[in-house]
Amino acid sequence: NAGVTQTPKFQVLKTGQSMTLQCAQDMNHNSMYWYRQDPGMGLRLIYYSASEGTTDKGEVPNGYNVSRLNKREFSLRLESAAPSQTSVYFCASTYAQMNTEAFFGQGTRLTVV
Amino acid sequence: DQQVKQNSPSLSVQEGRISILNCDYTNSMFDYFLWYKKYPAEGPTFLISISSIKDKNEDGRFTVFLNKSAKHLSLHIVPSQPGDSAVYFCALPNAGGTSYGKLTFGQGTILTVHP
């Protein structure tokens, strides 16, 4: 059972480049989330999807877009990367909307130069 | 807006002793509290939780205490083991009907357990 899988694990981008972070879960979870973690800070919510076909902004959505492709997959897109988006990105999923026991992927370390 | 604070960036303890990690919050509307554990190069994993109707929840070596009047929760690990060395986050779900399980995390405390 793979759980939550993120690709890629590492990425270096130049300022202005675009990229998409992929996330897939095989636990039949309804809700999926994207967080970022910066040094000395906890994880902060970027976007979330309560169910297939819906997405909503979190605490720090600026500069990002998301797509809930199907129940399994939730992608995060950076249209024009900036150095401030250098971070570690985590995807998570939960079974029910109010279930707070989230399962996290292993993370994607992104550096924007 | 909610705020969650872990004021100790790091904690070092000897194997076999107790580790106590602390977390403070500002919004008294929270009714559920969680602790996550994170190893380097891995995602956070759920460790233990507590509901606001309780003041203590125990799971093996891990116990979480909740003091609602002080808006404070703590995680006790007894006895501490070297494998417990990790970053520990307290996490509080957003209150309200539209939260959908969104979490606000504290800054984390790096626990190092020395053999």
Image (cartoon, coloured by chain):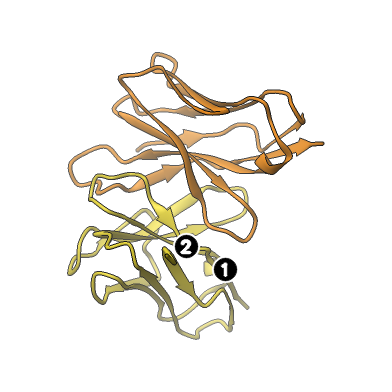
Chain colours: A yellow, B orange
Query: Where is residue B16 drawn, in percent x and y?
Result: 74, 26
Q: Chain of mark 1?
A: A
* Residue that carries the numbered disc 1 in the rendered image: A86
What's the mark number on residue A44? Answer: none
What element does badge 1 sit on?
Answer: loop
Q: Is residue A11 left or right of residue A20?
A: right
Of discs 1 and 2, which sits in the foreground? 2
Query: Where is residue B52 drawn, in percent x and y?
Result: 33, 23
Query: Where is residue B1 drawn, in percent x and y?
Result: 35, 38
* Residue that carries the numbered disc 2 in the rendered image: A105
Judging depth in this view, the residue of A109 and A62 nearest the camera is A109
Q: Residues within 10 Å of mark 1 (few under 14, many from 20)?
A: some
Identified at 80% across, 36% down, the residue is B114
Q: Is residue B83 above or below residue A95?
A: above
Q: Please, what is the three-letter code of the amino acid marked with disc 1?
A: Thr
What element does badge 2 sit on?
Answer: loop
Place residue B86 in its image quadrant: top right
